[in-house]
Image (tube, rainbow, N blue to C red):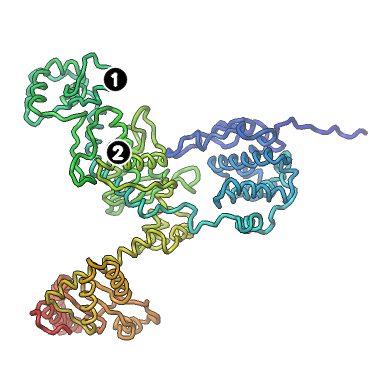
Amino acid sequence: MSAAAPSFRPAGESKVWPAGTVVYPGAAARFGDDIWDLAALKTTVNHSPRSSHVINFTVGLPGEWSLLARELCMCRVDVRRAREAGIVLQRPVQPQTAHGRVVEVRRAAQFQVFTGRPMPAGWSQADADALVRWRAERARDHRSLTKTVELVWDLRLFSCLLSEGGLAFDPWPGLTYEQVLTEVLGEGKPARPQGALTPVLPLDAFVPLFAAARAYVEVFGPDILALHQLLEARPLNGAEPTAEALRRWAEDPGTRFPVHTRRSVSVPCTARWATQAGEPIWSAVCRLAGGSRPRTVRRRCEDAVRRAVAEGRSYEGLSPITAMVERPDGGTGPWRGPFETQADLNLERAMLRTAAYILLVGLTGMRDSEAQDLRREAAHDAYGTPALRARRYKMRGAEPEPISWWVCDLALVAYRALEALSDHPTHVVATVTGRRRAGFDAREAMHRFAAHINASLAANGLAPIPAVEQLSPQVLRETAAYAIGRFSELGDLVVGYLFGHARSTTTASYQRYRPGDSWNTRVHEGEVDAVAVLLETMGRLVDGGEPVIGKHGDELRAVALEVRATIITDPVHARRIAELHRSTWHHGDLVSCRFDPKAAVCHRVARQIGVADPEPGPLHDLCVGVGCTNAHYTPLQLPGLRQRRSTTRQRLAEATAGSTGAEQLAADLADLDAIITQLEGAPDEPTK
């Protein structure tokens, strides 16, 4: 009996997936297609579908690489087939992940062609090492190289499912990403980023960026929205205003009219009548009058309008500029020149949209997909607090999760600006010109916003925004998480919940930046400056004969007077004194504590209630004030002490007469009266 004839597979055909295999349910793409169009699976509006949901296997994938790229994608999409081969995967990857894998395969194909090596099935360990070194010469960032290592591992992991075979050896067995890079690149490996891979915006860039966004929304926004609403309002279908009504409107002393500028006259116009500088802009006049046909409105009230313009009741451009700002030259003026053309309005609408987006993401920590998915009428109250309805997509499977983001007043103002600006029927973040479409390229828009601010500093009165290459929605979100977690009392779990992190370690990594970074440095300097100002104020009071009460009162008086004497003549010396003082003294509204752990009554009380090792500093909740030798008082504490006395009196009046609580309140009131009397006494009274 003759042997069975061998079966041959046509070139470009997979041994596992027939050409007609559906890639993702719900999308029209088939395995054998040269282009996988997965746009039907797109759920978020923040990215163009062609950027991440269309995968082209004809570009950069010569010969057998096109089939290999399709199969490597399917290995992680077709989880059932992988499990049948003994490879356990949790879930199918998203289209964006498959798109990224194809990009990495293109790089490997370029390496193979560039170096003249065979396909991966013919590689050795030396070839895998050479790929990593080749990529390291072209990409120095840590994340790109780990993606290369991951591709090599996949060529081995899925070798049984690849038609031409994957790697025939186990690359770098038992090593982690970091250990692989160390073994292959040695000292030449890129440094592993501290904390999250996404950098935090430097403070000197975040502050002017956020300040500019706030100025656009709160100060410039009303001018932009007024013109936007005027020009975008649909004309009434009814009869045009009568000549009498138009004349009365035009003769009203409060009515002002838009007139052409030199620049607006030079712009090509489709109007049938000639225009010149100072000529009324009849299209805008018609809108203001409530009409729909400029020629009719002009014919009925031209004389009255021209008389009003001659009287000075006019403004240049399409709409008046009402917001005034302080400019770098010390003068005051409008934040921009007149809106001379529709292009001027389009530019400022785009800037306002970006500014409102920056405020929303910076104040709420929304992801780009969540912020751009906000719908109309999303504002509501959640448990008595203003909130925005949104939907969370990341790690939520096919259906997004409805959530409510608690927002502050400024974030709500930003949302209202987006809602007023958008002409989209459902979404508030949308295009501002042309075809109505939800979403925009936030990364590009933020860079354009910074460039626009820097180009208009002479007029807008804002601070310049330093160039930041990494400016993006994720960087802005991560900066917000860093600031909230690092400089507030909220812990990683709370911040992680607010930012929708799947693991608390993600939130913790957001906080891991060098102690000397610009944020920590600025906060430290700000605290030192605040102490210097406080001491200078105390020195002024002491110079005027005001008392300082406490065991170490002389020390506090001397430091305050020295800072007052040097803060102008030698500010560096004054700051140095303030910094030394800051490590020992702790000033509050009710008491200033010259902390000595041995004499601290708060620490003694803490041990009595079971705290074996109190924190190394004043325990404000357990401070007894007058009964502790660490306590000191100056007239700066008088407002707080008076308020405390008033509260104590009220509590004493409500307490049961003769009770232990009443006795304690009476004793506290006596101490407060004694301290306040001394602070309010004559300057020549003793200070210790």
Q: Is residue 479 left or right of residue 546?
A: right
Q: Residue 471 shows which numbered tag?
A: none
Q: Position of residue 509 (x, y in %)?
A: 47, 59
Q: Residue at x 15, y 85 (%)?
A: 658
> In the rendered view of the protein, which quadrant contains the C terminus?
bottom left
Residue at horizontal 35 percent and vertical 45 percent from the top: 358
On the question of residue 394 being in view, the answer is yes
The residue beneath circle 1 is 268
Residue 516, percent across and down? 41, 63
Q: Is residue 647 visible?
A: no
Secondary element at image label 2 = helix
Residue positioned most to the right: 1
Residue closer to the observer: 84 or 230 = 230
- Front residue of 218/554: it is 554
**At label 1, which amino acid type do we have?**
Pro
> Is 164 located above or below residue 632 in the figure?
above
- 96 vs 685, nearest the viewer: 685
Q: Residue at x 27, y 46 (%)?
A: 462
Q: Is residue 67 left or right of residue 363?
A: right
Mark toward the start of the polypeptide (1 vs 2): 1
Q: How many marks?
A: 2
The residue wearing badge 2 is 419
Q: Can you tell which of label 1 and label 2 is closer to the viewer? A: 1
Whether residues under marks 1 and 2 lie with C-beta atoms below 8 angstroms apart, the answer is no
* Percent position of residue 650, x then y: 13, 73
Task: Judge whether 230 appears above or below 644 on screen.
Answer: above
* Type of the residue with mark 2: Glu
